[in-house]
Image: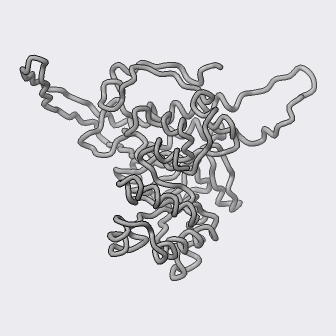
């Protein structure tokens, strides 16, 4: 099978960073997802993985997430690096990293950002090439023998091309400036019809193989002004109660695809503190299920973050309960363990 994108050297980029041990790689949709069942898993902090995006797809995760940073001015970072040789001698050197104002960077904290880890390199470039490959042009001399419906675009899952991939971008910097920097990077996807979007004039959702949701510092007002919205915002799940005016929830049904919230804000501090050491009880389940049911009434999927990550048995118990209650995307850090549980 033809490689969906060309192998590229990471000798001066990802391969030099802790946790990113491969010097080069080449992936196709087939070798990543052919023998994998799609699972309702959200690859939390996906960029932490040895192969961001690719590991998540290989485990069948339907949702991925990257924290992104945009800086309006170029700046440099100087670090003192101390290394110990085999003989026990310490060598100290000064390194300088430059962060350009025409790039969007991926990382959890600004202090640990690396100039080589950009949104385009880690996510957008490979996703675009995947989608190009899965949406070829069919040319026939005579009658078209195709029996499949090709009106809609195909996605990145080999055995289920009709299934979309949810891609979350957690804005860590100024919402408007970050959004303005992001828009040109999304334009190739828009031109090819790869992005799901909402037509506010026709009041209609148009599906696509890639669904982008902005969380964190969301430019809500800016997106709401757009007649065609190619990105969605993360709706606050905590508002999906009977106490919230229906017109407010209806607004989110046009701005969002998914509503999410932390376990702590949904259960309350006292219940959450107790739940961190035990299975979710009946009262917890009733409280959480109400949020899920209300969000579903407005055609929104749901996700909970900030739940238990250790010990493993308790984390798995919570994940199973959340799935049973109707949570659509399960926040996971350990993809291998979660994929086995489900």
Q: Residue furthest right?
A: 143
Q: Work out which residue is located at the far left of the displayed protein and give it.
A: 89
Q: Which x, y percent locates residue 263? A: 41, 65
Q: Quadrant of the N terminus?
A: top right
Q: In the visual, does 294 lie left or right of 16? A: right
Is 23 on the left or on the right of 85, as rendered?
right
Q: Is residue 206 at all visible to an observer of this figure? A: yes
Q: Is residue 216 above or below residue 240?
A: above
Residue 281 in which image quadrant: bottom left
Q: Nearer the viewer, residue 277 or 134?
A: 277
Colour scheme: one colour
Residue 261 picture location, percent across and down: 45, 64
Q: Residue at x 51, y 52 (%)?
A: 213
Q: Residue furthest front?
A: 313
Residue at figure coordinates x 52%, y 45% from the top left: 340
| 137 in relation to 280, above or below | above
Answer above or below: position of 25 versus 101. Answer: above
Q: How many marks?
A: 0
Position of 276 compared to 38: left or right? Answer: left
Quadrant hosting residue 232: bottom right
Q: In the rendering, at what x and y percent does residue 114 appear?
A: 30, 33
Q: Is residue 230 left or right of residue 179?
A: right
Q: Residue at x 38, y 59 (%)?
A: 308
Q: Residue furthest bottom?
A: 243
Residue 8 image position (x, y, % from top left):
46, 19
Q: Nearer the viewer, residue 218 or 164?
A: 164
Observer able to see residue 221: no
Work out whether 168 lies above or below 132: below
């Amino acid at each position: 099978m033809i490689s969906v994108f060309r192998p590229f050297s990471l000798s001066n980029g990802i391969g030099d960073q802790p946790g990113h041990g491969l010097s080069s790689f080449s992936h196709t949709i087939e070798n990543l997802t052919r023998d994998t069942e799609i699972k309702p898993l959200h690859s939390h902090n996906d960029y932490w993985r040895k192969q961001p995006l690719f590991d998540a797809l290989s485990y069948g995760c339907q949702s991925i997430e990257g924290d992104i940073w945009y800086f309006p001015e170029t700046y440099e970072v100087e670090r003192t690096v101390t290394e110990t040789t085999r003989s026990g001698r310490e060598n100290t050197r000064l390194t300088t990293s430059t962060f350009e104002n025409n790039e969007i960077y991926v990382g959890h904290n600004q202090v640990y950002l690396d100039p080589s880890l950009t949104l385009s390199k880690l996510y957008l470039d490979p996703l675009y090439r995947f989608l190009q490959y899965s949406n070829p042009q069919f040319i026939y001399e005579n009658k078209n023998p195709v029996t499949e419906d090709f009106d809609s675009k195909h996605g990145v899952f080999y055995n289920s091309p009709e299934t979309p991939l949810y891609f979350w971008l957690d804005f860590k910097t100024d919402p408007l400036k970050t959004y303005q920097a992001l828009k040109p990077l999304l334009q190739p996807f828009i031109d090819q019809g790869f992005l799901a979007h909402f037509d506010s004039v026709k009041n209609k959702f148009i599906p696509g193989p890639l669904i982008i949701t902005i969380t964190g510092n969301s430019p809500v007002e800016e997106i709401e002004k757009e007649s065609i919205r190619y990105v969605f915002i993360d709706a606050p799940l905590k508002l999906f109660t009977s106490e919230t005016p229906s017109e407010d929830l209806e607004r989110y049904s046009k701005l969002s695809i998914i509503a999410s919230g932390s376990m702590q804000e949904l259960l309350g501090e006292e219940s959450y503190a107790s739940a961190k050491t035990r299975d979710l009880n009946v009262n917890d389940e009733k409280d959480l299920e109400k949020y899920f049911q209300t969000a579903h009434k407005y055609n929104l999927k749901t996700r909970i973050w900030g739940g238990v990550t250790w010990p493993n048995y308790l984390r798995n118990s919570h994940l199973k309960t959340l799935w049973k209650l109707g949570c659509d995307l399960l926040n996971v850090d350990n993809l291998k363990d979660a994929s086995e549980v489900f």
